[in-house]
Amino acid sequence: MSQIIWIARHANRLDFVNPDWFLTAERRYDPPLSDDGMVQAQQLAKRLKKENIGHIFASPFLRTVQTANAVAEMLNLSIKLETGLSEWLNPVWMTEEPERLPTPALAKLFPRIDNSYTSRIAAKYPETHEKVRERSGQTARCLATEFFPEDILLVAHGASVLGGAMGLVGEIAKTEVKASLCSLVKVVRQDPEWLLELTGDTSHLTHIEEVIRFA
């Protein structure tokens, strides 16, 4: 059996461009994409236009949904919200459980969201680095091997991109995967093995904002 799992990190986020946004935000741990992040998401969509992707899964945070939506519109696909791909719910970064837009509100903003899809894996605040890797790896394995045999795209965050890749190819992902903003990881299934082909490609981007925080 041959299958491709694409794992993308969200594009640039507004609070990376304007840190003061955080001070007055209603949902301060759920920033939208920045203007250049929206451009990056479109560039990602163009990169994936000719790929044979059958399903798109996204973390339910706004920045990942916006990134996934650009690809979904390009490929004419729906978006399945999967909490197992969520941001690392790190109590050092987040003083409380992050507030997000509820799914019905997101679906009004992004009609491509599939309201019939039920998330497979939960993400519970607070969690350790080991826990985020475990649950995002479990999510990638669950979606790819138990439910969706087609080529799929997972849109996630820095830690969950790495964890998702580790869940498929193992410890080698720790040193090989580079989860830069709006980067692409490609994992190919050739039973019984998973092979890492792209480890963090950003060649589709004309601009990438380098950031310190792995979020």
Image (cartoon, rainbow, N blue to C red):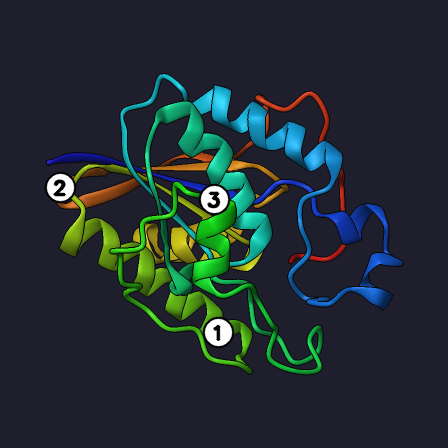
Q: Element at badge 1? A: helix
Which of the two discs, 3 and 2, labels the residue nearer the N terminus?
A: 3
Cα–Cα gap, marks 3 and 2:
36 Å
Residue flagged by tag 3: what amino acid is it?
Answer: Phe
The three-letter amino acid code for the residue at tag 1 is: Glu
Q: Is residue 188 visible?
A: no
Q: Is residue 89 above or below residue 110?
A: below
- Farthest residue toward the front? 108
What is the distance, in whole Å, between disc 2 and disc 1 at their CAs?
27 Å
- The residue sitting at 47% across, 50% down in the picture is 108
Residue nearer the viewer, 63 or 193: 63
Could you say where residue 135 lies in the image, as x and y percent from the top left? 38, 69
Q: Residues within 10 Å of mark 2 (few under 14, many from 20)?
A: few
Q: Residues within 10 Å of mark 3 (few under 14, many from 20)?
A: some
Mark 2 lies on residue: 191
Answer yes or no: is residue 3 visible.
yes
Residue picked out by circle 3: 110
Query: Which residue is drawn at the image coordinates 89% and 58% (left, top)?
Result: 20
Which residue bears the numbered disc 1? 130
Residue drawn at 70 percent across, 78 percent down:
92
**Circle number at residue 178:** none
Residue 28, quarter of picture: bottom right
| Residue 203, placed above or below residue 90 | above
Look at the image and tell me in which quarter the N terminus lies: top left
On screen, residue 92 versus residue 62, left or right, reads right
- Residue type, mark 2 in image: Asp
- Name which of mark 2 and mark 1 comes first in the sequence: 1
The residue positioned 83% from the left and 57% from the top of the image is 21
Front tag of 3 and 2: 3
Q: Position of residue 49 (x, y in %)?
A: 40, 20
Answer whether labels 3 and 2 touch (C-beta < 8 Å). Answer: no
Label whose residue precedes the other's in the sequence (3 or 1): 3
